[in-house]
Image (cartoon, coloured by chain):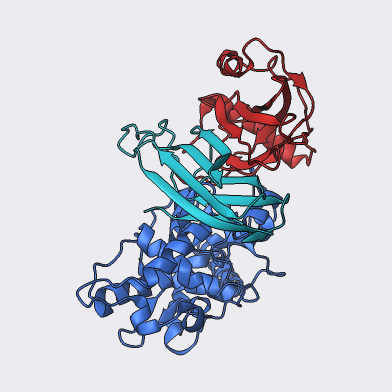
Amino acid sequence: MRGLDQQSLLGRRALLAGAAAGLAWPVLRVRPVAATPASAKAAMDEILKGREPTPGRVKLDIPVLADNGNSVPMSVRVASPMTASDRVRSIHVFADGNPLPVVGHFHLGPRAAKAEIATRIRLATTQTVVALAVMADRSVWSDALRVEIVLSACLDD
Amino acid sequence: MAQALVKIQAQAKRGEAVEVRALIQHPMETGFRRDDMGKPIARDIIREFVCTYAGEEVLRAELQPAIAANPFLVFHVLATESGEVAFRWTDDKGVVQSESARLTVS
Amino acid sequence: MLYRQRLAWGALALLLAATVGVAQEPIRPDPVRSGRDFQAPETRAMQDDDGANPGMLWVARGRALWDEAVGAARRSCASCHGRADETMRGVAAQYPRVDPSSGRLLNLELRIQQCRGERQDAPVPRFESDELLALTAYVAHQSRGMPVAVSVDGAARPFFDAGRAAYFQRIGQLNLACTHCHDANWGRMLRGDRLSQGHGNAYPAYRLDWQAVGSLQRRLRFCNTGVRAEPHPFGAAEYVALELYLAWRAKGLTVESPAVRR
């Protein structure tokens, strides 16, 4: 975290200019999978196993402009009655701009009351976060969100 | 011994979705950082967090270095019977810790 | 001609010195606003909810340490002070304060170190150690919601004057004093940050940047390196005096420890 990393200097200048101009940050909902680099795609393929995720039913919630990439609140909610036969088996979260694309795998057992998980995550830089939900009928649903990470003026290590 | 704070109500009605919030003190060291001397700092994260209720699984989370330091997890237990809600987590050093709470269902 | 020019410059310098003298009279930001107001809504929510505030992990550890017998004297904090929720209520709000026996100005960390070393005959916990941060956070937490109320008169006056002078002293390669960010420019953007008024009522605080709880002096050290000045060592008298000035300046705010900051 310490110091400036050269490659994103321009990006931050643009960010600063944007902030100075008081521009609103656009909320971008993007199509998952297509927008992700190779390693993230490979990680997702391990879950998808040839299936195609359908956008919908999953609601990924992250502040689109985060104060600090070290701890970004995130929640995933899936529309599901969570009955014995119609339920979410697992939720998977990916971040394509992190050194490792997998954020976490969350397996919901028979005692889970809601198809919902919240946590705080690390985002190394501005990037797209993808959530997949695997249902009991093996169908996969998804949501994706572009998150801007603000770089602080005052950085300690 | 690291601290952990688990919040769950003590009583619930049958069929109720009971919120669980777990906060665990852990550096979640990514393995990508270096110390002041330039030496890599070994990865040390909580790999797995499991919550069971009356012996059956509620949540099993496989965590990665992208989970923020001092992990915070929120999820819901389906109140079906009075029993123990148990939490167990394991880190890269093999340290296993646990916590539990009693849920009384009426 | 040259002489007259010099005289004119001299007069100007005197005039400037007088102006600066006036400018150095104590001022407080108006309206006074906690650093909490300068955080993102998610960060504020994290602070406000004890179940989500990671700083509470340090408070919980401090609670356990409070009752733990330590040192040759096998004495716990509770052996002398009883229940912290009764005896420590409002105490942190009065720190830094002058220790009557030594005449030194002590902040809460130094006071706890003194207890550990002199009264409990135990090893003195290092600055920024988990033990010292946990105990400090636990004691400070007992004053949460109470107004910051330090004494700056009597024995405290020379320390207050030194702290005030430090606050207005330009330092570092950037040649900035505390006042240039936190009086003249609070509320404005500095890259991705909104400059706060620079109060200390959050501390010990959980910083997302640190991914841990840290002391006000850790924050001051990183202000120093930010303006490219040499930081003082932890516990330095300069910092404790500055903490006293900051606490006086934070009049109207309440103790928030453990607050959450970006």
Q: Where does the image place residue A107, in percent across and percent down from the top left?
A: 59, 32
Q: Is B102 situated above or below C237? A: above
Is C258 placed above or below B29 here?
Answer: below
Q: C198 and A64: which one is in front?
A: A64
Q: Residue at x 51, y 40 (%)?
A: B50
Question: Going by the image, does C9 lie left or right of C30?
Answer: left
* Residue C262 seen in this snapshot: no
Image point (60%, 14%), residue name: A45
User: Within the image, what quadrant is residue A139 found in?
Assistant: top right
| Rendering coords of residue C4 (x, y %) | 55, 65
- Residue drawn 78% across and 27% down? A29
Q: Colour of chain B?
A: cyan
Residue at screen point 67% across, 48% down = C189
How many numbered discs? 0
Q: Is residue A126 above or below residue C104?
A: above
Closer-to-camera residue (B2/C10): B2
> Is C171 on the left or on the right of C36, as rendered?
left
Chain A tint in image: red
Percent coordinates x, y for residue C9 in the rendering: 55, 63
Q: Is residue C6 visible?
A: yes
- Can you give x and y, in whole percent of width and height, for residue A64 in the image? 72, 37
Chain C, chosen colour in render: blue
Which quadrant would residue C185 be assigned to in this image? bottom right
**Of all residues shown, which one is farthest toward the bottom?**
C154
Above-or-below relation of C172 to A71: below
Q: Quadrant of the C terminus of chain A?
A: top left
Q: Extreme top residue here? A: A50
